[in-house]
Image: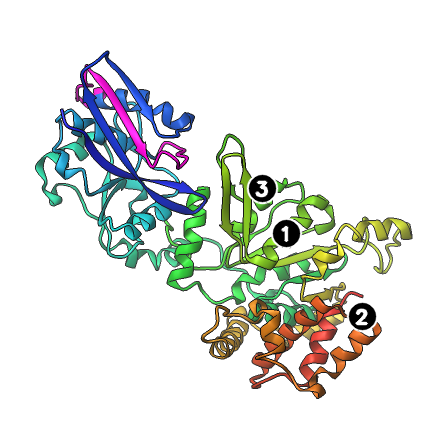
Amino acid sequence: MPVARTHCVGLVGVTGRLVEVEADVGPGVAGTHFIGLLDTAISEARGRVRSALINSRFAWPDARVTVSLSPATLPKRGSLFDLAIAIAVLGAAGAVPAQRIAAPMFLGELGLDGRVRPVRGVLPAALAAAEAGVRTVVVPALNSAEAALVPDLTVVPVATLGELVGWLRSGDLHRLPVVAEAASLSRDAEHIAHAGGPPWPDLCDVAGQPMGRKALEVCAAGGHNLWMLGPPGSGKTMLAERLPTLLPPLDQEKALEVSAIHSVAGTLPAGRPLLTRPPFMAPHHSATMAAVVGGGSGGVVRPGAVSLAHRGVLFLDEAPEFATTVLDSLRQPLESGTVTIARAVGAVTFPARFTLVLAANPCPCGLQGTVGHPCRCTPAGRRRYLDRLSGPLLDRVDVKMKIGRATRAELLADRHFVETSATVAERVRLARERAARRLSGTPWRTNAEVSSSALHRDLRLPDTAMAPLHRGLDVGTLSARGLDRVLRVSWTLADLAGKDRPGQTETSAALALWLGVD
């Protein structure tokens, strides 16, 4: 009997690589042999595939069955190879035409009764298949809308192994439904899914914190990181939760990138295969390093909160309560926009370009500086508490704010000046457009991404504008990294003000935001 070949995709992080699945049914002692650097889940596939074939009324070959997944050097994990293995075995046994299974890609987990179950990572797998030249992908029905997000790809959804074999035998594309319009429909899926849910948080809900709202606007316009220091009940969490409402919606390329990460993690919301809004992640302060940065056991590496917050916001409430090792592990992704997790089987790189928001109380009890509630923390205790946020980490935070509790008079007065998220988001959009025009032809799109060399060469400011920063360098209140951070914020302030370049007013204001909690 001939060797039958078909295709599947192996995932390494959020990157897919095409895998050729070969099956040979030949003479010899009856048995099933899998080869190709497989993990336990794939080794167990022989039992799932055999039961699925028999319960779908297809005979299992009474011969020596050899299944090879190549390239053999690529680690292969998970149950997403089940469907491709089953089809390859049927092709080698002559149950389906071998020529009809050679071109498509098959992806899915099999139940013992022949059902095709959904799997994680369908979107990055479909993207990898399209890049490799595959034009037809067969996926579980529940994953079909996710795969259809990839343009120029014919998606065939299947619910059972039996109906798939019937389609392959007939060659009639109309025998099974073909998803062709899911990509256009899914662009509005987030708004449709949200229509019956709670309203989005709005910035106008936060009264009594005008400086906090302004800090959010600056961070949203330039992609800057934020640290808020203040007692409980002052509005730090409310402000952080409203930052994503000020960010522009994700364009198609970024939406696919973000959705692919959540697909691998298995966190895509039901009915929303495409995430069009910037994500917001707020892990609990007891989260481990693997939960925040990424990791896992058994050779399976999952993205952490920093990657799930890619193109969005990562909020660490009660930041000093996080483990010091977890906080310091954020320094590398804040600089590079990626996080690399090394394991014995290899290294996996996940994207992690996010806006970091830290919130902290002024002391362990949180009552320092409040009226009528005396703080009983010792000076040494307060110092140890805030020292958990290391200097190198805070050096990567562009905007630092002290948030105090608003009085009744301040609350009443400020309600006349609050603006909705839509109003502020429009100013943010215009500021980002100015920055994008200025940075056209470069790999950067926001001021926070601009390199140090470009700041001091292509975007160099006159000495009059730099005067406040030179004084900060002379007296030691500003480091070399801090100088770059302040310059980036000053460009954002200029964009918000509609100016071509920052002046002394913008650099002074940016310096004040940098030194906000000193």
Residue at the (10%, 34%) spot, across then down: 169
Kind of residue sitting beneath label 3: Ala
Q: Is residue 68 magenta?
A: yes
Residue 269, horizontal then vertical, whole percent:
42, 47
Q: Is residue 492 magenta?
A: no
- What is the distance, in whole Å, between disc 1 and disc 3 at their CAs? 12 Å
Residue at the (12%, 26%) spot, across then down: 94
- What is the distance, in whole Å, between disc 2 and disc 3 at their CAs? 35 Å
Residue at the (8%, 37%) spot, across then down: 170
Q: Which disc is residue 291 wearing?
A: 3
Residue at the (52%, 50%) spot, across then down: 307
Residue 17, horizontal then vertical, whole percent:
35, 44
Is there any visible trace of residue 386 in the rendered image? yes
Of circles 1 and 3, the one toward us is 1
Q: Which residue is mark 1?
A: 330
Q: Are marks 2 and 1 in contact (CB under 8 Å)?
A: no
Task: Tell whether 93 sits left or right of 408.
Answer: left
Is there any visible trace of residue 377 in the rendered image? no
Q: Is residue 367 above or below residue 412?
A: above
Kind of residue sitting beneath label 2: Thr
Quarter of the rendering containing residue 368: bottom right
Q: Which disc is residue 477 wearing?
A: 2
State which region is magenta. Answer: 54-79
Classed neighbour count for the residue bearing mark 3: other residues with Cα under 10 Å, few (<14), some (14–19), many (≥20): some
